Image (cartoon, rainbow, N blue to C red):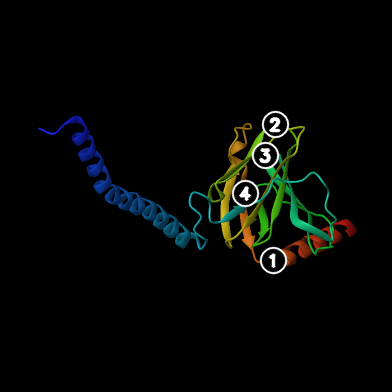
Amino acid sequence: MPGRASRARLRTAAVLAALPLLLTACSAGAHGSGAGSVRDAARTGGTPSGDTDPTTTTKRPATTEAPDPASAPVNVIEVVGSQWQWAFTYKEGPGRQIGAVHDAAASGDVPTLYLPQGQPVRLEMKSTDVIHSLYIPAFLVKLDLVPGRTNKFEFTPNVVGDYDGHCAELCGAGHHEMRVVTKVVTPEEYRRHLTQLKAQARTEAAA
């Protein structure tokens, strides 16, 4: 009958013999997770990124320094929530010198937030009355708008398309009306949209 030392040697040999099989199983599990990421990216047209959303890339925390409008490294957009509507002010952006432009949908219409594909964006979010929350499911992001403070979030939208969103914070009787469409467009289309808003503002001011 083998002694204690012999039995220990046998157990060690058995573990070493099974180790390659264990490593192979772990490797297969890791590759399976990656395949899921590739499938998710294929559905959206994005790049595989594990648990991150392929439609966006989160960037560094926003700085408190105000960028020069002509050479701002990011497109700064102010998002204001109020009962029960959204309003957007497009402030600065790379190489853009047309100045800030404001956009708010007519009563009863769903507003559209334009974002440039492949360019960093910083949303500066404010509320005029109660707490609201901008929720865009496709971006995997929920951003709170709190009265008396400005919350900032910086990211880069990667995939052109329309993404539905809404207020995810119960904000009163008209809460259900606070819907929004986030529209990611090419940089050229983004500039055209802002130029049109600027021209529309001049026309309304002259009327």
Q: Mark 1 points at which residue?
A: 187
Give left or right: position of 101 versus 107: right
Instruction: From the top left corner, tell me how far across and down residue 197 is, in percent.
Output: 77, 60
**The C terminus sits in image quarter:** bottom right
Residue 92, percent across and down?
Answer: 80, 56
Q: Look at label 1 and name its amino acid.
A: Pro
Kind of residue at disc 4: Val
| Tag 2 residue | 130
Question: What's the CA distance linking mark 1 and mark 2?
Answer: 34 Å
Sooner in the amino-acid sequence: mark 1 or mark 4: 4
Point out the frontmost of discs 3 and 4.
4
Q: Mark 4 points at which residue?
A: 180
Residue carrying label 3: 84
Mark closest to the chain's N terminus, 2 or 4: 2
- In three-dimensional space, the C-alpha distance between marks 1 and 3, rounded to whole angstroms, equals 30 Å
Amino acid of disc 2 = Val
Crowding at mark 2 (Cα within 10 Å: few <14, some 14-19, many 20+): some
Camera-nearest label, 3 or 2: 2
